[in-house]
Image (tube, rainbow, N blue to C red):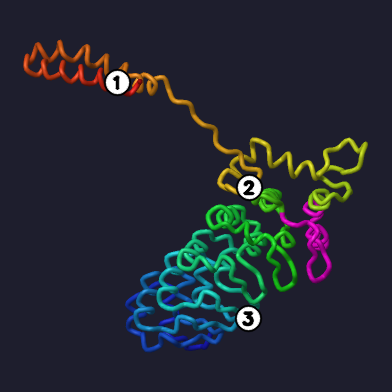
Amino acid sequence: MSSNPRPIFAACLSGDVEVVRANLFDRDEQMPEGYTPLSLAVSAGHSAVVRLLLREGVNVNASDGQGVTALMHAAMHGYAELIDLLLLHGAKAMQLQHDGRAAPGLAALFGRPAALGAFLRVDPELLSAVDGRGRTLLHWAVASQHLVTLKYLLGRWGAATLLEVPDAAGDAPLHVCRGPEDVLLLLYHCGPQPPSLSARNHAGHTAAEAASAAGCNEVATLLRAAGGEGGCGEGGCAEDGCGKAAPSSWLETRAGSAQMTPLFSFLRTSRARVPPARVPRGAWCHALRGGALLRGGALIGPPLLFCASPAAGLRECLAYVLLLLLGGVLRS
């Protein structure tokens, strides 16, 4: 920052609308690092300042020295309301920063499901869009290790269709999985069929080998065993006579345990999903269906109404007779 910074920068960070309004002639200026008043206001979450700047026609797609735009700041912070505003004013969702990532992918990587919802409601096609690294939102959600974000993409937007999509390095989403175990379980069981365990990336690695190369030995052991390979690890051993549960069986039995039911309950296509049990009707419902409550009320009602009004009691008796006739027709 220069020794004499423009007042609009500090005002955007603090949310001082009046100072920003008084310095709108500097609305498209940039700090030495490339930050604009809009990106500062967005990163600080000051929606009133953001609205003012957008009304004044600022360059909504201006980027800083790393290629980061105001929309990317909103995505990383999870500001769904500001994402809506920026997209409405022409922000480019798939504009790339210098490392090849785009705003929707940043929302997935930083574990911001509300921000993802803002993007996908505006354009559902962003689900399968690829960024400069060839990655989809599912890649970044798996890399984030954020279970809620992954569940949201799979359950709300059907991201299981992207399980076999490779990125620019040939990595499918399973290749970038580094845990935790619930993320691996969800990724392995989210569809009617498990993702390919034998697919290799451009380096020649399977998902298990990629996890091992990254030092995630527990994930590598489970994936090797699920693919029919042997080897011991914390999950168990696939060799006969070891006495421990095999990791391959862990991936199946753990998914079928009662504790895991909520993990898959929202996934209609998951083979591990347990459909909710039907709740039998209560006795009161059957009594109502049989007309017992109606008959009981009709028996008590006429005497009470006769005491108050003979005419009303007569009308009640006629209604009772009609109900009995109607009930007989329905039962026949």
Residue drawn at x 44%, y 87% as measured from the top left: 28
Decide: is 165 above or below 313.
below
How far apart marks 3 and 1 lie (CA) works out to 75 Å
Label 1 sits on residue = 327
Q: Secondary structure at mark 3?
A: loop
Determine the image quadrant of residue 58. bottom left
The image shows residue 259 at horizontal and vertical percentages of 64, 37
Q: Report if the CB atoms under discs 3 and 1 are less than 8 Å apart.
A: no
Q: In the displayed structure, does residue 74 sit left or right of residue 251? A: left
Task: Let me know if residue 147 is in the magenta part.
Answer: no
How far apart marks 2 and 1 lie (CA) works out to 45 Å
Label 2 sits on residue = 270
Q: Secondary structure at mark 1?
A: helix
Decide: is 9 above or below 178.
below
Foreground pick, 230 / 128: 128
Which quadrant of the rendered structure holds the C terminus?
top left
Decide: is 131 above or below 213.
below
Residue drawn at x 66%, y 59% as measured from the top left: 142
Comparing labels 3 and 1, the label whose residue is closer to the camera: 1
Say whether disc 2 or disc 3 marks the residue closer to the N-terminus.
3
The amino acid type found where label 2 is placed reads Ser
Magenta-tinted stretch: 195-220
Say whether disc 2 or disc 1 marks the residue closer to the N-terminus.
2
The image shows residue 218 at horizontal and vertical percentages of 79, 51
Comparing labels 2 and 1, the label whose residue is closer to the camera: 1
Label 3 sits on residue = 98
